[in-house]
Every structure is written in structure tokens, then in C-alpha cells.
Amino acid sequence: MALPTCQHLVFLCLFFVGSANADDYVDLTYNFDNNTMALPGVTPFMLKQEKRGYTLSGYWHERNSLQFGEHAGTHLDAPVHAFEGGWAVDQIPIDRLVAPGVKIDLREKVKDDPSAELTSDDLMAWLDDHGPLPDGVVVFVHTGWGTRYGNKTAYFGTDSNDTSKWMFPGINPGAAQILTSYEAAIGRRVVGVGIDTPSLDRGGVADQLTHAELAKENVYGLENVANLDRLPTTGFDVTVLPMKVAGGSGAPVRILATLPSASASPATPTLLPLLMASGVALLAKRSL
């Protein structure tokens, strides 16, 4: 059999790299811009233009400076945010940032009560319907609140900075306790919990008990998560990419979901070794 030429190998590699479908992935991150939501007291996002234009040498040059709080926009809550001695952002192990994901849909409950919470009963009912959580999972709670993102009054449920008047859905501490004890009970670990609202705890509560329950077991939080309506209930994977802030209690984060359809791409994993072997053979032939 004739060995492939370099051109053949390049064509094949480009074909399979290019076969990835944009519909196989979902960006769960809001843009950082003038509409970025931040709780009162958190430094809002600001991009300041420093340079923009052509240099004397005739090439384009552009740069900006950024200012924002750790907990503005789509962001990660590190465990140390709510538990003394918990992991900071840079201490979260990488294997907890690439994980299987599941989604719990709370939208019907939120329609009747904008302060609804994911309760232990809701969580147990979901487990009865869908089976046990995968090991090392990130659990997302879909309340539908993300449709309000960008409208501060609608998103926080008030235009007041009085925290007792905030109104948005969240996660009950009882449900959080089931998630933190899941490894001891089932042998499968929950590494992160995300929600499409400003906070894991519902609006208006005085104590952040859900935050504290998750953080004491080094379970990180993801808040202001976008596009949860585009995720299936199970079967997807997530990659969580926070800015690696040393000692940070939180950080802006890019969250990418890989849908089940991505793993159905034909032949790429099986042909990759063949391409590599062909390349090695070609190089060996040329070296003779």
C-alpha cells in the first residue's frame, strides 16, 4: 500500500479537525460588558480603552484595561468564599474543572413562586426519575431566571440595594446537604453546583447557608450561568475555566458544555492513531 504524502496527511487532519460541529457545544457564559450583572457592593465590570489605532510604522495596535469584582457576571465561587480554610480559586484541582454535568429543571416551580428553591424533595424526585448522579459531577439548576439577565431590577427582583428585598430563586440548604453527603452515601462525588441566578442562595435570605454547606466540602459554585435552556437533562460534559487568581475567593469563568452529539462524531478517535502511524511511517521512509 502506498504511503500517504504530506499533503494527504494535512488534508486528513484538517478534515477531522474541521468536522467538529458548533452545535455540539454550548457556551454557558454571559459576555462581560456594560450589561454584566453584579450584586450591590461588587465592583462592576468596566473595560477602559488605552490604545486603538495605527502606529507610526503602519500596523494596528489595540489594548484595554479591565476592572471588575471577583463575583461579577458569570463567575466561580471558590470554597474559601464561604468557608474559612476552603480552597481558593487556584487550589481547585483541575480534575474538578472538567466534569460530567446534569441539569435539574425548576422552571415550573418558579413560575408560581419567584422565590422558589430547589428542595431536598425536588432533588430526590429528580434522582428517582433520572437515576444516580455520575461521579465527579457538576449539578446545574435551571430556574429560567436567565431571561431577566441584563435588566437589574428584574434580575434582582428589586431596584433596592437592601438585601432583604432581593427576590430570585435559589437552592435550599437541605438540597445542598444531600449533594455534599452524596459521596458518603453513594460513593459518587459532586464537585460543583451552578445556577442561572445571582446567587446559589435564594434572594432575600439573611444567611448564606447553601453557600456555606457546599463550601465546607470544597464544592465550588457557579453563578449567573447562561443558556441552561440549551442543555439536555443528562449526558453532557462541562469544562469550567476560571481566571487562575492566586488566593481568589472567586473569579470570572468561561463555562463550556459538550453535548452528547459531540461524542458521536464518527471515526475521529479511531483514525487518529492511523494518521499518526502513517505520519511516522512517512517520516521513517524519508529518513532512509
Image (spheres, helix red, strand yellow):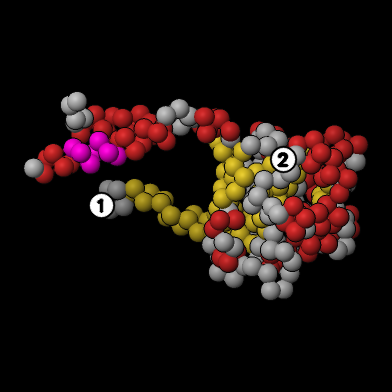
Q: Percent from the top left, x then y, of residue 78?
A: 66, 62
* Residue drawn 20% across the image and 38% down it: 281
Q: Percent from the top left, x then y, of residue 99?
A: 60, 48
Labelled disc at residue 57: 1
Magenta stretch secondary structure, dominant: helix
Residue lying farthest left?
A: 288
Q: Quadrant of residue 233?
A: top right
Q: Percent from the top left, x then y, of residue 254?
A: 57, 49
Q: Which residue is mark 2?
A: 103
Q: Which residues are magenta?
A: 276-282
Q: Residues within 10 Å of mark 1 (few under 14, many from 20)?
A: few
Q: Are marks 1 and 2 in contact (CB under 8 Å)?
A: no
Q: Amino acid at mark 2?
A: Lys
Find numbered disc 2 in the image and state the secondary structure of the residue it sits on: strand
Residue lying farthest bottom?
A: 85
* Residue drawn 77% across the image and 55% down it: 185
Q: Is residue 139 left or right of residue 201?
A: left
